[in-house]
Structure formats: structure tokens, C-alpha cells
Image: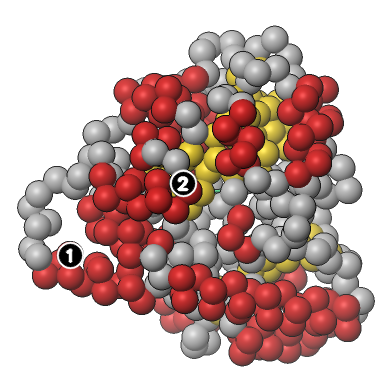
Amino acid sequence: MITVQDHIAGITPYKPGKPAKELERELGVSPVIKLASNENPLGPSPLAVRALRAALDEGQLNRYPDGGGYYLKAALAQKWGIGPEHFILGNGSNEVIELLLRTFLAPGDEVLAADLTFVVYRLITTAAGRTIREVPLKDHVHDLEGLADAVGPRTRLLFVCNPNNPTGTYNTAGQVASMLKRVPDDVIVVFDEAYAEYATANDYPDTLEILRRRPNTVILRTFSKVYGLPALRIGYGITVPELVDYMNRVRQPFNTNELAQRAALAALADHAHVAQSIAINEAGKGQLAALFDRMGLPHLPTQANFVYVNVGMDGAPVFQECLKHGIILRHIHGDWLRVTVGLEHELTRFGQVLEQVLPILKG
Ligand SMILES: Cc1ncc(COP(=O)(O)O)c(C=O)c1O
């Protein structure tokens, strides 16, 4: 008989989409346009690709990676203006989330997060047999006062996803400051800033400044979004050396691979690629806003590389119909879909499909 702990049996597994090539074959549509995973439609940094080729040519795949991430951390230290001992690298920032939970949550401790945010906080907390309490978004935005209210004696970690996935909304510096006044210093506050490079708001918080004053603060960043390297799985956390030291005790010694480290290092210096990616995102945001306005579909202003849109009917059949036309979206819940900002021609095609299928579905 196969047995498993109840909290594992109760998890709904993350559902990966089919590979684009497989969909193209099944649907007879090519190319499929993927607007589902908040990826960079421009592609990876060319400097990163060049670094990967050079790394392969060196023929060192028989060696273990640099488990300390020496060069990448040195470059990050320079970028952020703090010492390399403030950084922890992860196999995607997802792994840093996992390290935080595994390192700092004792039995009976709990995590606080929003109810509609990055699903991995819930997934990893539940998988670890720990408790997560979720505070509803308020007008689609993290309710930071509500989160501060919800802090209890066993709250150990508090996640603020900023900008928030899937809504694209953000919390201002003022909101964060006012929340922090009320959150005890021993609660580790994690600012997940996977999309921060896309944020243009003047009052987007400077969390590094917060970290300087409040040690139990962690900032999460990733190479999966604006740098265009999600396939390589590399991200990082920034915090005080003491917390890094504890996480290093739990971390697998070679958790980030050599190719990922080298590509990330090159991507970090590719300012032209980052600038172009942001410009494409700004243009695409405008294109999507114009499309949804024309169609009368409510959508939220976004600080990220995706738009949260209300299609005015159950989103599941809308997702399915778009899929049949080779457009992959993400149905979040109810009437709401999340659409990743693509290239101009991809969004034009998406607009044509949506304008075709939605009136038919609505009858
Ligand atoms: C809010 C948020 N944090 C973290 C991640 C994960 O990033 P990584 O690829 O670095 O694990 C994502 C990816 O979609 C995300 O949306």
C-alpha cells in the first residue's frame, strides 16, 4: 500500500501547460503565441547567450559549479552597493522561497500572505506541513494594514508580492512604511520583487533602504523575467548576512548550476537588453489597454509585464477558445484572465482572436 501524509495528499499539483511545439502539432497552428507565464517576449539577453556558448566551449561540464556563486555575487554586490555576503542564490527565486520556509519555520509557525498572489508561497508552505494564513486583497491590491492586523504570535514570515502576480497591482512606499511600523521586528518580511524592473511608479518602495534599517527583511529578485532566462532557473535573495548564513546551512551545496550563473552574470551587464525589454513592455501595456478599452473589458493598471483583465463571463471557455486559435493565456478565477505582454504582432493577433471569440461565446 502506498501512503502519504495528509497535507501532501491535499495539495493540488501545479499544472504545467503542454509544450508549445506539442500544441502546434495538435492544433495545426504555428506559431503558438504564449502569453501565459510572464516571460520576456524579446528573448534572453544576447550577452547571456554568448556567455553560455563560451562556457560550453570551455568544456567544463564535467566539473561541479561554483557552489558559492563567487562571480555572480560579486557582480550583484556591485549592482546593489552592498557586500556579497548579503546575497543568496537560488535555483530560481522559487528556491529561495523554499529555503526561507525550510530554514525559518518551526513546527506551529505560520506564514502570512495575500489570498490572490503567487501560488508558490501556499504550495511550499503546505508541502512543508506548515500553516499559511491568507488575507484578502483589497480592491485587487495587497491589504498591508490587513496583513499587519493578521500578524499573530506564531507568524514568522510575511510575504508581500510587489508588483503582485496575478493582478499587476503594487504597494506604495508609504503603504509599506506604515505596515512595517506595525509588524514586529522578529517577523521576516519578504518582498517578492520578481517584476520590479518593470515597475515605473515613482512611489514604488526602495526595499534596500528598508533592509538597511530592518534586518528581518528579504528582497527576492529573479533572472527569469526581464533578463529572459527562466529556462536556466536562477534567482536570488538579498538580506542580512546572518539570515544568508542560516539559509546556506539548509541549501544544497550546488543548488545553482554553472551555466545559469554565467548567463546571469552576463545578463546583469546587458543594460541594452533590459532597456529594450522594458520599452517593449511599456508599448505592449499600452496596446493591451487600448484593446481592452475598445472592447469595454475592465482591466487593472499594471506595474508588471502582464495585465489582469475581466472578460465579463467565465474565463475558462475564453481561455479554451483562445487556445484553439493558438493563443495561450492564464485563467485565474471567475471572469479574470491574466495576459502576459507580448510583442506587438503577438498582441495584435491576440486582439483579433479575442474580438472574434468573445462575442460568439457571449452569444
Ligand atoms: C511573484 C513571482 N515570484 C517569483 C517567481 C518565480 O521566479 P523564478 O523563475 O525565479 O523561480 C515568479 C514567476 O512567475 C513570480 O511571479
Residue that label 2 marks: 81
Colour scheme shown: secondary structure
Residue 298 at what x, y percent from top left? Answer: 88, 67
23 is higher (above) or lower (below) than 351: above
Residue shown at 47%/59% (left/top)?
Answer: 224
Q: Is mark 2 on a helix, strand or loop?
A: loop
Three-letter residue code for mark 1: Ala
349 relative to 65 in the view: left or right: right
318 relative to 146 in the view: left or right: left
Residue 134 at what x, y percent from top left? Answer: 73, 31
Residue shown at 44%/57% (left/top)?
Answer: 223
Q: Of callouts 2 and 1, which one flags the residue occurring earlier in the amino acid sequence? A: 1
Residue 361 at what x, y percent from top left? Answer: 83, 76
Q: What element carries label 1?
A: helix
217 relative to 178 in the view: left or right: left
94 is higher (above) or lower (below) than 36: above
Gap between marks 2 and 1 measured at Cα: 27 Å
Quarter assignment of residue 363: bottom right
Q: Which mark is residue 55?
A: 1
Residue 242 at what x, y percent from top left? Answer: 42, 22
Is residue 162 at all visible to an observer of this figure?
yes
Q: Which of 346 and 289 is in front in this view?
A: 289
